[in-house]
Amino acid sequence: HFLFDCGGNIISEISLNSPSLLKLRSLININSDIEQELLIITSTNFLIYDNDGNAITEWDIMGNFHDLTTASFSEQTDMAIILLNNNGHLFKFPFSFSEQSTSEWPQYQNNSRNTGSYYQPLPEEINENITLKHDAVIEKDIEILQGNTLTIEEGTEIRFEKNKSLNFTGIYEVPNPGGLICIGTEEDSIRFGGLCNNENRYYWNGITFNHRRISEIKHSIIQNANCGLSYYYCKSHKLNKNRISNNSVGLSFYNSSFYVNVNEIINNYWGVTCFNNASPFFGYPLETNPDIGHNGVMHNFIAFHSNRASPSLEGGHNDICDNADFNFLCNPLDEYPINAQNNWWGADDPELIEQTLYPHVLIHYEPWDREPQTIFSNISDSLTIFQQACEKLYEEQPNEAIDLFKQVIEDNIETIEDQISVAYL
């Protein structure tokens, strides 16, 4: 077999007679708008040649591949090469990548997880401002050095290998400390999780902020971590309208203070922990504002734990209820009480409320809200069992969805919902 150029001349640099040759593809517009490149896959590597027979070295990838294809996505020009190796791992490489970041392509090249997330655009140590636009699998601990900011665009999903983490280090005050900008939307949230099932609470190590680093996190989901978000000596943070679920600890504060508003903190072992003079604000005592407080801290083993700290819940109108052990647990040796007036504790009877507070004499909960105050408590009441099951399926909580779908088909009324439920099961 021979390969000819457009003038009819044999391109001698490219041998097509190798017994290791597996597949050929020709594609347009990888490195040029007018020339056609040749893709060659062998049993040991993947190569791309230009029209002159010169290998494009930056695309030279070693591996035990046995198939390749191309894919077009939202636009005709948004093309990518997809390789499949003998272990079933998918490698996906975009035809174009940011020319502004010389480190971006090697990190694309090194990511190899068959999880639906094919990019690895983060080096282990970040010393510049970076915007993350693609799904990512984090295979190493990532450290964002002081003075630099990581921005994550809406709709991005980040999955972590076991025990890996995202760390924003800092040791002193600087004019522009940098941090994390992570703003999704209601329709297109940002997700942080482990390479595990969604119920795992101890998989990756979470996101940590140290010493005056800053962040704005909104419409994001944080799950599967030993500690979802940890704050040490922090004050300039915005944490609004997120879901923090299925972690060992949802939020941890150490000598840190800022507002926490309209978050759903559910299905963690510890919802919120506060240590060493931490004083996060889960409310504003002077007026009722639906954008301040109004967090749903529910279905955890322990909602709040405070040890030598003073979190403020007064006037927050948070729903702190349906937690397995305690709604609030604090150190009985703490000197100062916890201000927690005007919140819903899951009951309108002081005896029942005090059973969920320990020691209740240190937690000033009166007056309390007489009914749920947040959108999170009303979701289940407003949906049918079938709708709740579909919602759990959408949220990738299959065990909860299975139980609900079973309830749908176990009643005595046969509807189209029964057929759909059986199909899902």
Image (tube, rainbow, N blue to C red):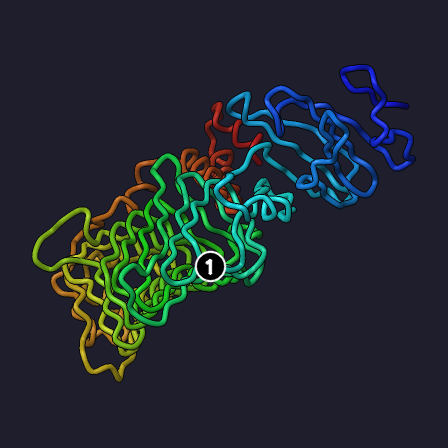
Callout count: 1
Locate residue 72 relative to residue 64 in the image: left or right: left
Q: Position of residue 421 (x, y in %)?
A: 52, 32
| Placement of 295 over or under 324, stated as above or below | above
**Residue extending furthest left?**
286
Q: Position of residue 36 (x, y in %)?
A: 68, 22
Q: Which residue is mark 1?
A: 166
Q: Position of residue 318 (x, y in %)?
A: 23, 55
In this orientation, which residue lies closer to the viewer: 216 or 370?
216
Tag 1: amino acid: Leu
Locate residue 248 relative to residue 138 in the image: left or right: left
| Placement of 280 over or under 31, stated as above or below | below
| Placement of 354 over or under 298, stated as above or below | below
Quarter holding residue 304: bottom left
In this orientation, which residue lies closer to the viewer: 111 or 177?
177
Q: Position of residue 307 (x, y in %)?
A: 30, 77
Q: Quadrant of the N terminus?
A: top right
Residue at 32% in and 71% down = 172
Locate residue 385 relative to residue 77 in the image: left or right: left
In this orientation, which residue lies closer to the viewer: 327 or 125?
125
Locate residue 326 relative to residue 410 in the image: left or right: left
Badge 1: residue crowd in 10 Å (few <14, some 14–19, many ≥20): many
Residue at 31% in and 74% down = 275
In this orientation, which residue lies closer to the viewer: 230 or 395?
230
Q: Quadrant of the C terminus?
A: top right
Q: Please tell me whether mark 1 sits on a helix, a strand or a loop.
A: strand
